[in-house]
Amino acid sequence: MKKKYTVCIILSLVLMFSFSAFAVKPSDKQVNAAKPAAADRTEVLKSRFLNMLNHNFAYDEALDYNEELVNCAALACLDMRDGDFIAERYIKDYVFNMYGVDIEDFSGINAQFPKKEGFVYIVPRGFSVYKHSGAVISFNEDGTCTVTTSVTVNAHDGEALTG
């Protein structure tokens, strides 16, 4: 008896769900989805350049040496640190994406500091932070861009300069 009731209940549920699925019809009306406004190319480039410049820690001669690039990248990646170290993969990706430099061998980087396999030691040092704002972009005839910004330099000794 229980078996008959269970089969009847299951059959009625299947019929009920089938009926409700066939009763639903897609709307014939076309829904006008809101389209995102097209962003101005110059504004997009301003945002990208400011983002890149404000995450850059390598200037002048630091761009010429892999060890300097790695140490500058370590400062940019401090939120991914593991104690006094940062995983090489984070530094490698950052340096490649930011500067286009592919560093394969980290064994000679910061050789005089403590070592941990697969990690780079964060060299403690004072560092000036450059804050860029008010980007002005001009497009050159060869397809490149010239970006001019206002820069505030917050030196590690507490002195701030604006230029």
Image (tube, grey):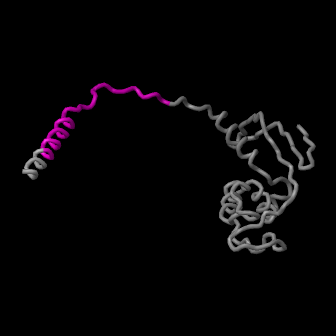
Looking at the image, is 3 positioned above or below residue 48?
A: below
Relative to residue 24, is residue 116 drawn left or right? Answer: right
Residue 74 at x, y percent in the picture: 76, 59
Magenta-span inclusion, residue 22? yes
- Decide which of 101, 112 is in the foreground and name it: 112
Relative to residue 30, is residue 12 drawn left or right? Answer: left
- Decide which of 30, 40 is in the foreground and name it: 30
Looking at the image, is 113 positioned above or below residue 146?
A: below
- Decide which of 113, 105 is in the foreground and name it: 113
- Decide which of 6, 38 is in the foreground and name it: 6
The residue most toward the front is: 1
Q: Which residue is drawn at 69% across and 74% down?
A: 117
Q: Residue at x 78, y 63 (%)?
A: 122
Residue 163 at x, y percent in the picture: 88, 37
Residue 35 at x, y percent in the picture: 48, 29
Residue 103 at x, y percent in the picture: 71, 67
The part of the chain drawn in magenta is 9-35
